[in-house]
């Protein structure tokens, strides 16, 4: 058995790790420091080059835990753990489509309303509640669930990018991909120099702000033929960027702007507000594509890839081997190149890429092309997918490899 596959097999039998340890992508890999202050936000904190993938699954788990602990320590003014130990925006809870009785009960328990987002394109609303003074977010979450047990309640959980942008690299000329006019949305950091998008909007403090990760994702999407890209920046310079509510707002905007496919290369815990938004946007016929993350096969299922109906995407290297750091979802649909590929960083320079983050936009581009063909888009994708591993759908490659030559610059 090849070494990479042997490690995957060994990792798969490990017991599930604690919920608090599932979020941070690429955490077992050696990190290169990022220039700039902490106030550049979580996007820069986590957007670091990936140099090697020689860590064991146990080390991946421990490194994730350490990174979360560091995040909570460094960003404690803005971030705190929710009742499940997941990082979330400090001092705020989210109520999805609350009724009058729930709001009355919340006010009576000392929760103040901080505002309501009425998301017309999604047909839902989200009310932000301020946690009463003296209570932690986790304590407040448990209290509110006791007094309003039927409420759709969530912390404003943070989501993290699932791939790394490495050192600058030369790019070889490649053949042009067929142009796809179907509008494709991207929820990530903002693209930088070299990426001209049809529309760009920010959903976090300081957004839009160019990022290496967002630039790489958009450059791959455009390189795979998507000509009409709508970019939503959910990070900016916000220390609590990548929150569930920011992603929900981005989905509302993209749905209203006509996106037919949405690519999300972010990883976080299950969240009631985001689950409702994903369900709503899919109900409008939008195809949602998400990366499974780089937390390793022993990690709990990643979201939004694990929400029902989302196309969950993993990555392979240049020899069509699964990335040994790839995470998992409750289901797996497709694989695409996620290593030995190149994209542009925020300065417009070509850089090496690694991570399932970069497989997701390639599948999104193929989904857009399948929609444009006018046939049954999923049938088209399945016909195109190269079956790898055991015959038929499997846990390493899903239904097969898409966009097999994409990103090889």
Image: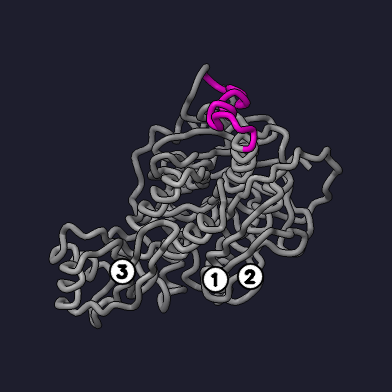
Q: Is residue 16 left or right of residue 112?
A: right
Q: Secondary structure at mark 3?
A: strand
Mark 1 or 2: in front is 2
Q: Quadrant of the C terminus?
A: top right
| Residue at image point 48% right, 57% down | 251
Comparing marks 1 and 3, which lies closer to the viewer?
A: 3
Q: Position of residue 21 (x, y in %)?
A: 39, 53
Q: Position of residue 107 (x, y in %)?
A: 19, 77
Of callouts 1 and 2, which one flags the residue occurring earlier in the amino acid sequence? 1
Q: Quadrant of residue 369?
A: top right
Using residue 321 as the reference point, say whether residue 241 is left or right of it: left
CB under 8 Å between callouts 2 and 3? no
Disc 1 and disc 2: Cα gap in Å? 10 Å
Q: Give the residues in magenta.
A: 372-390
Location of mark 1 (residue): 41
Task: Using the image, tell me which numbered label, if any, was put on residue 321.
Answer: none
Mark 3, residue position: 93
State which quadrant residue 335 falls in.
top right
Residue at left offset 53%, top offset 30%:
378
> What residue is at 58 percent from the left and 22 percent from the top?
387
Of labels 1 and 3, earlier in sequence is 1
Q: Residue furthest right?
A: 173
Q: Earlier in the sequence, mark 2 or mark 3?
A: 3
* Residue neighbourhood size for the residue with mark 1, other residues' Cα within 10 Å, grouped as few (<14), some (14–19), many (≥20): many
Cα separation, mark 2 vs mark 3, equals 26 Å
The residue at the point 64 percent across, 45 percent down is: 182
From mark 1 to mark 3, how far is it between C-alphas? 21 Å
Q: Is residue 143 visible?
A: no
Vertical arrangement, residue 239 with respect to residue 21, above or below: below
Q: What residue sits right under mark 2 in the picture?
A: 209
Circles 1 and 2 in contact, beta carbons < 8 Å: yes
Q: Quadrant of the N terminus?
A: top right
């Amino acid at each position: 058995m090849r070494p990479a596959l042997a490690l995957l097999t060994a990792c798969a039998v490990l017991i599930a790790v604690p919920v608090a340890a599932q979020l941070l992508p690429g955490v077992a890999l050696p990190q290169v420091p990022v220039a700039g202050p902490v106030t550049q936000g979580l996007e820069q904190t986590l957007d670091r080059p990936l140099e090697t993938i020689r860590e064991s699954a146990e080390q991946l788990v421990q490194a994730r835990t350490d990174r979360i602990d560091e995040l909570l320590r460094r960003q404690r003014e803005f971030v705190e753990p929710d009742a499940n130990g997941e990082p979330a925006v400090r001092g705020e809870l989210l109520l999805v489509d609350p009724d009058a009785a729930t709001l009355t009960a919340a006010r009576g328990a000392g929760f103040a309303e901080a505002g309501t987002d009425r998301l017309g394109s999604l047909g839902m609303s989200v009310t932000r509640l301020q946690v009463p003074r003296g209570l932690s977010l986790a304590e407040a979450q448990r209290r509110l669930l006791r007094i309003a047990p039927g409420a759709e309640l969530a912390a404003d959980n943070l989501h993290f990018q699932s791939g790394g942008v490495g050192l600058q690299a030369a790019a070889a000329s490649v053949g042009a991909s067929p142009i796809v006019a179907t509008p494709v949305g991207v929820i990530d950091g903002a693209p930088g120099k070299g990426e001209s998008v049809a529309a760009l909007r920010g959903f976090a403090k300081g957004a839009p702000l160019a990022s290496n990760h967002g630039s790489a994702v958009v450059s791959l999407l455009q390189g795979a033929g998507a000509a009409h890209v709508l970019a939503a920046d959910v990070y900016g310079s916000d220390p609590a960027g990548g929150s569930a509510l920011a992603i929900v707002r981005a989905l509302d905007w993209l749905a209203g702007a006509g996106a037919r496919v949405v690519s999300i290369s972010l990883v976080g815990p299950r969240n009631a507000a985001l689950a409702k938004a994903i369900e709503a946007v899919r109900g409008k016929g939008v195809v949602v594509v998400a990366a499974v993350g780089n937390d390793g096969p022993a990690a709990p299922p990643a979201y939004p890839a694990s929400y029902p109906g989302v196309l969950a995407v993993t990555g392979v290297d240049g020899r069509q081997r699964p990335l040994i750091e790839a995470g998992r979802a409750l289901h797996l649909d497709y694989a695409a190149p996620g290593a030995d590929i190149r994209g542009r960083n925020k300065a417009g320079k070509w850089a090496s890429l690694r991570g399932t983050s970069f497989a997701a936009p390639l599948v999104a581009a193929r989904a857009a092309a399948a929609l444009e063909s006018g046939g049954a888009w999923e049938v088209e994708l399945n016909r195109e997918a190269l079956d790898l591993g055991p015959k038929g759908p499997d846990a390493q490659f899903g239904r097969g490899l898409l966009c097999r030559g994409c990103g090889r610059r």
